[in-house]
Amino acid sequence: MEAIKKKLAILKEEKEAAVEKAEEAERQKKDAQARAEAAEQDVQNLTRKLKLLETDLEQSEDKAQDSDKKLRVAEAQVEELQREKKKQLENQIGILESELSHNIATMIVCYSLKDSPL
């Protein structure tokens, strides 16, 4: 009878140890599930952020292309304006040179008439 009581006590202790082990395993399982859910949530958040960043990148690239096109157009306009201004200045210089030549010629005639005996 004593042997049976000892055996029952041993079995009871083994059962309690097994229950504790099972409870610990259950806690670990729940912790692992919680970490997995948190990781999945992180993945979803990062995926959303990535999509937003990709959209922002596309918009930025589009804006950069638009800005580049506008810049090229503006540069072409500046070059055209510079060419036109250069032509205007060259024409004005030509007119001034002609006037200067005419004025010099007039002055020469005037001085030669002044110095010549009539």
Image: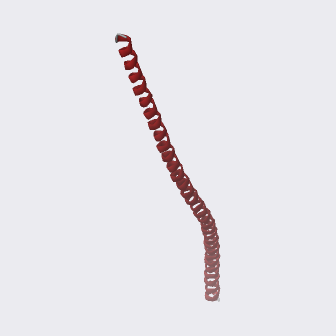
- Say above or below: 56 vs 14: above
In the image, what residue occupies the spot 50% across and 50% down?
76
- Say above or below: 23 vs 61: below
* Residue 78 x %, y %: 51, 45
- Decide if residue 99 is on the left or right side of residue 10: left
* Residue 75 x %, y %: 50, 48
- Say above or below: 101 vs 66: above
Q: Which corner quadrant of the image does residue 97 belong to? A: top left
Q: Decide which of 96, 1 is in the foreground and name it.
A: 96
* Residue 89 x %, y %: 47, 36
- Decide if residue 55 is on the left or right side of residue 83: right
In the rendered view of the protein, which quadrant contains the C terminus?
top left
The outermost residue toward the front is: 118
In the rendered view of the protein, which quadrant contains the N terminus?
bottom right
- Decide if residue 17 is on the left or right side of residue 109: right
Q: Which corner quadrant of the image does residue 104 belong to? A: top left
- Decide if residue 79 is on the left or right side of residue 115: right
* Residue 6 x %, y %: 62, 84
Q: Decide which of 5, 47 is in the foreground and name it.
A: 47
